[in-house]
Amino acid sequence: MTDTQKTTKMPNSRGAAGTDPELEAAIDRENARERRFKTRDVLLAIATPLVLLVAWEVAADTGVIDGRLFSPPSAIAVRGAEMVTSGELFGHLAATVARLLTGFVIGSILGIIAGMLMGVWRPVRAALEPMFTALYALPKIAILPLLLLIFGLTETPKVLAVVISVFFVVQINTLAGIIQIDSRILEAARAYNATGWKLFRTVLLPAAMPSIMTGLRVSAGMAVIVITAVEFVASNTGLGYLIWNSWQLFQPATMFVGLITVSLVGAIVTGLIILLERALLPWQRSNHHRKKAKSQ
């Protein structure tokens, strides 16, 4: 028997594209499992508030809770429909959203720039970090009287309150994202003449993006809280004003409409940021599924 006949072809454990069939099968199983979990999660997310609303309605109708203070969901829905029809709710909603988005965008941009500069240049970090740490601990709503003193009862202090609250959260997360970059990666990038804008675009920003997106998610909720609180005391429009004014006039149904609308605004803003994160960082979900598949 010749050497050629003695030689047997070893079975190829990888597919045509060079991938491990067992790993691909595990990933497919994990994806199917994730789809089942997502379906269950969606059903629970829908069913839980519905059950609570039904319990609230029954408790108000049977006198377990005082319906004059805790308006039943049916009364809140009726009042909400009246406010939508009259346009009253949209007027307050538009005012709040305009202030929120303006402040959020400005604060995010400034926070990313400051975090990047502090992460890249150590003297800038040494000069600004102690001051930023002290200012971050200051309640943002406490700055409102100073802003009102400087700018008066205009839109500027309301927007600036949001800018300040968003700025520090994004700046801290951006700085953390820059600091955690392996120095060897930076050295390799500079060895390939990646400096200035090229270094920022190809290394710094992609590496810090997960931390930046975390900061944006956290600051979004904080921005909704701050603008609502500001409108309590320094505005005659907006959802915060609607809630506070209806409480003063003892109109609980209107107050609950405002509270529900604020919560929906917060959920929508946070959801949009999560969608943006998935679009900008698609590899995170892929790596997550791949790691889970390998662990099985």
Image: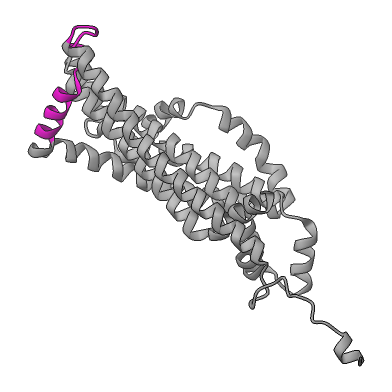
Magenta span contains residue 280? no
Residue 159 showing in the rendered view = no
Left or right, 206 with respect to 52, comes to right
Q: Residue at x 21, y 8 (%)?
A: 66
Q: Looking at this view, is 255 or 150 the one in front?
A: 255
Magenta span contains residue 76? yes
Q: Residue at x 26, y 34 (%)?
A: 261
Residue placed furthest toward the front? 1
Q: Which residues are magenta?
A: 62-83
Expressed as whole percent of the image width and height from the top left, the position of residue 50 reads 28, 29
Q: Looking at this view, is 72 or 201 the one in front?
A: 72
Q: Looking at this view, is 154 or 11 the one in front?
A: 11
Above or below: residue 136 compared with residue 117: above
Expressed as whole percent of the image width and height from the top left, the position of residue 140 reads 47, 30
What colouring method underlies this structural image? one colour
Expressed as whole percent of the image width and height from the top left, the position of residue 68 reads 17, 11
